[in-house]
Amino acid sequence: LNSTGETVVSYNGQDFYIIYLPGSRNSSPQLKIYINGQFGACLNIRYETSFDKLTKQIGLNRELQVPDREVDDALYFECDDQKFLNGIFNHAEAKAKVFDILKKFTTIEITSKKCLLTSIAPPIKELNKEIINDSIRVLAEFVPLIPVVGGNHPELKFFKMYSVLLTS
């Protein structure tokens, strides 16, 4: 890591970006690992907390649902594209991978251009290549499982149109 706590690592021909945030008196250090790419929609996934459940019950927030009740009860989704969300959880391998990731990471964040994993990190002195390489491997195995589907997202429409033009 450089002096700002960032670095880029190449793995299987792809660049993975690593950011270490040291934390403070009231927050834990964080390790963020991401890869750039073309993804269908925006989605944040994390374990659902008691507070999330309470705010849903009293109507302060709403969340898209997935058909699998076990998944829906365990995880909290911030997403506005039902088709994209279902696309991840309709595949057993992707569903299992999400739960495996959330054993080590606190959140999975997918945007139209990036997939990012965030975890509580050890102190910088304990952060080593093994931790970073394992994190990169986990992300590299998950990215191909992200569906290239989406609703009415302009980025995706442009990408599909551009791809058609290139292959025509």
Image (cartoon, helix red, strand yellow):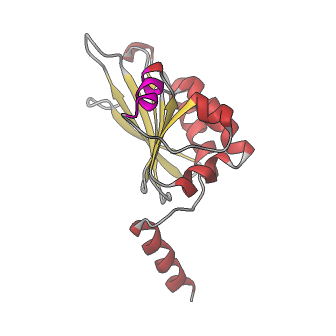
Q: Nearer the viewer, residue 35 or 119?
A: 119
Q: Nearer the viewer, residue 150 or 106?
A: 150
Quarter of image, res 18: top left
Q: Is residue 108 left or right of residue 93?
A: left
Which stretch appears magenta? 51-59
Characterize the magenta stretch by its predominant secondary structure.
helix
* Residue 150 in the image, given as x and y percentages of width and height: 52, 62
* Residue farthest along the bottom direction in this orientation: 168
**How many marks are shown on the rendered structure?**
0
Q: Nearer the viewer, residue 140 or 129?
A: 140
Which residue occupies 31% across, 29% down? 5
* Residue farthest along the right direction in this orientation: 92
Residue 73 part of the magenta-drawn span = no
* Residue 93 in the image, given as x and y percentages of width and height: 72, 43
* Residue farthest along the top direction in this orientation: 25
* Residue 64 in the image, given as x and y percentages of width and height: 51, 45
Which residue occupies 43% across, 74% down? 158
* Residue 13 in the image, given as x and y percentages of width and height: 55, 53
Which residue occupies 56% across, 24% down? 104
Q: Is residue 76 left or right of residue 155?
A: right
Residue 53 part of the magenta-drawn span = yes
Quarter of image, res 133: top right
| 59 lies above or below 160 | above
In which quadrant will I find the N terminus? top left
Which residue occupies 46% across, 29% down? 57
In which quadrant will I find the C terminus? bottom right
